[in-house]
Image (tube, grey):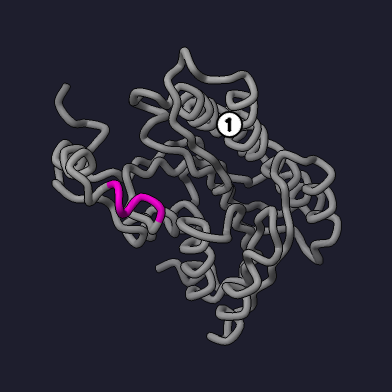
């Protein structure tokens, strides 16, 4: 299963660390040609070189998902359209709604909602031009489906991303372009590890029905399903991977 990913061209945004870096490795291990994208090229070079050393085909590019010119430049310079796009670039930032600044609101919506739209739009145009289908995966969150305190801008952006996913899937299905959202629950990374080891973090983990944080590899099956021909009839869905957290009792 998922053998059709081999030799596909994959773009992963926000690939300098965390989930983005993990997704890039996942597709590289499956034999795909991976393009790692982030705002700073120097943050990608070590990972690109490591993937190449392992025998993978990997490229690193500077990309600001909020800058239409940056996106246009990337797609203009690409030798071929990307078969698979993982819209992973995003920011969080916790703040009480009454204290949230207009600048912080705009920045969150720009990165988390406008950015994925601009990248998806460019990817779809490139695929349509060569009359080829593809898969776009928008990385959302369970916060798109159930809210948490001090995350009003983040929750709004991710909820918008899920509905944008549905809208794009409806328009682009006729071109063979599938658009889906991946909604992870709390996944342990180097950034949040210390918090989840604290009493407050441990209490949060206890509210997850499986009584554990997600691991990045817990997302692999869902990601590969949405990217590959195994999910050829799946489009416009929000696939939740959260250990049952979003279904936890109120």
Q: Is residue 129 left or right of residue 231?
A: right
* Residue 85 visible, this orientation: no
Based on the picture, tell me whether residue 245 belongs to the magenta stretch. no
Residue segment shown in magenta: 191-195
**Residue under the image location 33 percent in, 50 percent down:** 187
Q: Residue at x 19, y 43 (%)?
A: 205
Quadrant assignment for the N terminus: bottom left
Instruction: Where is residue 152? Give x, y as percent.
Output: 45, 22
Q: State the image quarter where residue 11 is shown.
A: bottom right
Residue drawn at point x = 81 percent, y = 66 percent = 79
Q: Is residue 127 visible?
A: yes
Q: Secondary structure at mark 1?
A: helix
- In the drawing, does residue 239 fall left or right of residue 86? left
Does residue 116 sit above or below 103 in this rendering?
A: below
Residue position for label 1: 108
Q: Position of residue 155 (x, y in %)?
A: 45, 26
Q: Position of residue 206 (x, y in %)?
A: 14, 41
- Placement of 32 over or under 101, stated as above or below: below
């Amino acid at each position: 299963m998922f053998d059709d990913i081999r030799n596909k061209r994959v773009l992963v945004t926000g690939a300098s660390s965390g989930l983005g870096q993990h997704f890039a490795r996942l597709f590289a291990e499956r034999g795909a040609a991976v393009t790692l994208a982030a705002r700073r090229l120097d943050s990608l070079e070590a990972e690109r070189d490591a993937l190449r050393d392992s025998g993978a085909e990997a490229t690193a590019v500077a990309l600001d998902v909020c800058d239409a010119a940056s996106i246009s430049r990337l797609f203009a310079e690409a030798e071929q359209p990307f078969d698979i796009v993982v819209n992973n670039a995003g920011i969080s930032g916790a703040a009480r709604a009454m204290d949230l600044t207009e600048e912080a609101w705009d920045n969150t919506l720009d990165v988390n909602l406008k950015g994925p739209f601009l990248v998806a739009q460019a990817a779809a145009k490139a695929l349509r031009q060569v009359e080829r289908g593809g898969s776009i995966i928008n990385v959302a969150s369970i916060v798109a489906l159930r809210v948490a305190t001090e995350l009003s801008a983040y929750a709004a952006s991710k909820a918008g991303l899920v509905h944008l996913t549905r809208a794009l899937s409806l328009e682009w299905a006729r071109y063979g372009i599938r658009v889906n959202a991946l909604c992870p629950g709390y996944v342990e990374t180097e950034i949040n590890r210390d918090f989840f080891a604290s009493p407050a973090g441990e209490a949060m983990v206890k509210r997850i029905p499986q009584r554990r944080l997600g691991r990045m590899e817990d997302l692999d099956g869902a990601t590969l399903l949405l990217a590959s021909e195994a999910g050829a009839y799946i489009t416009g869905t929000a696939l939740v991977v959260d250990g049952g957290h979003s279904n936890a009792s109120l």
